[in-house]
Image: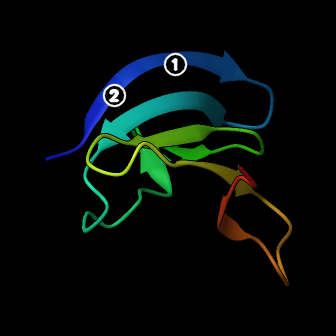
Amino acid sequence: MITLISYKNMPGNEVLCEFRGMSGDTKPTKAIGKAVCNGSSFLEMDTGYTSYYDATPSTGGWTEAPE
């Protein structure tokens, strides 16, 4: 189960989010009916890894942060 910890409305009908969930969860690309924006974060509670959202249309998606 994914939990939305916090969010901030941003220009362009996007939202900057902080999520928590498990490594097997599908990381969201929408929250509160808006697109997740560049720099949103997802902490995997079972692994401790954090991923950040890259909103680049051609290459974007969730990318695990280097340790």
In the rendering, which numbered label is found on residue 4? 2
Is 18 situated above or below 43? above
Residue at (77% x, 45% y) in the render = 38
Q: Amino acid at mark 2?
A: Leu
Residue at (32% x, 67% y) in the render = 26
* Residue farthest left in this picture: 1
In the rendering, which numbered label is found on residue 7? 1
Is 38 situated above or below 3? below
Q: Are marks 1 and 2 in contact (CB under 8 Å)?
A: yes
In the visual, does 62 lie left or right of 45?
A: right
- Image spot of residue 67 (x, y percent): 71, 49
Instruction: Give how far apart the Cα atoms at labels 1 and 2 are.
Output: 8 Å
In the rendering, which numbered label is found on residue 48? none
Is 62 situated above or below 41? below
**Secondary structure beneath label 1:** strand
In the visual, does 24 lie left or right of 27?
A: left
Q: Nearer the viewer, residue 9 or 56?
A: 56
- Image spot of residue 6 (x, y percent): 45, 15
Q: Is residue 39 visible?
A: yes
- Image spot of residue 52 (x, y percent): 67, 49
